[in-house]
Image (cartoon, helix red, strand yellow):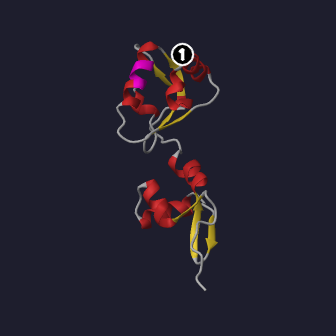
Amino acid sequence: MTLKKSRPNSDWITIEESCTLLKLSRPTFDKRRKAFHLKEYPWQGRLWFSRKQLADRILLQTPKSISSQVNLTEASCSRVSQIKRKGNVYDLRSLHSIDPFGIICLLCTIISEKDKFSVIIDDSNVARLLSSIGFLFFFN
């Protein structure tokens, strides 16, 4: 009789997959999993971790260098890089204001990405503005 080695849950990933996702070495991942109190799921002799929990607690944590309110306007000194998170994830929740100049900068930056990218939005005025002009249509 052979032991079935399937994935126990579609959200669960192994330590190796977690290290690849986060672009961390195994010792660094071990430190982070303790620091962020990640829940471990033992199954068939392996430890599994929730992909969603990894994203919420580690991948999408707000870096200290990102200000809480970014203004992407012609008159501001803010840059699109201030809303970029680890990997190719753009967090539009920190946008306080945006004008046509900022929209074009954001669009050019996102289009220039060579890999897949993700956008995090909320129900703010900026997100509603971007939605009303069809900007978020590109991400469906």
Q: Is residue 41 magenta?
A: no
For the residue pair 66 and 115, the one nearer the viewer reads as 115
Residue at 45% x, 61% y: name it: 19
Q: Which residues are magenta?
A: 103-107
Q: Is residue 25 left or right of residue 135?
A: left
26 shown above or below 109 = below
Where the N terminus falls, by quadrant?
bottom right
Q: Amino acid at mark 1?
A: Ile
Residue nearest the observer in this picture, 103 or 140: 140
Give neighbour class at mark 1: few <14, some 14-19, many 20+ (Cα, 10 Å).
Answer: few
* Element marked by disc 1: loop
Q: Position of residue 82 (x, y in %)?
A: 43, 32
Residue at the image point whose x is 65% and y is 26% from the top:
123
Front in this rendered view, residue 117 or 54: 117
| Residue bearing the label numbered 1 | 133
Q: Quadrant of residue 117?
A: top left
Q: Residue 119 in the image: x percent, y percent?
A: 51, 35
**Spot occupied by residue 106 in the image (x, y as percentages of width and height):** 42, 25
Vertical arrangement, residue 93 with respect to residue 49, above or below: above
Residue 99, visible in the rendered structure: yes
Residue 106 lies in the magenta stretch: yes
Residue 69 appears in the figure: no
Q: Position of residue 66 (x, y in %)?
A: 47, 35
> How many numbered circles does the render carry?
1
The residue at the far bottom in this view is 1
**Relative to 22, does residue 100 appear above or below in the rendering?**
above
Residue drawn at point x = 60 percent, y = 51 percent: 52
User: What quarter of the picture does the C terminus occupy?
Assistant: top right
Our reading of the magenta stretch's main secondary structure is: helix
The front one of 40 and 36 is 40
**Which quarter of the figure has residue 134?**
top right
For residue 81, what is the image quadrant? top left
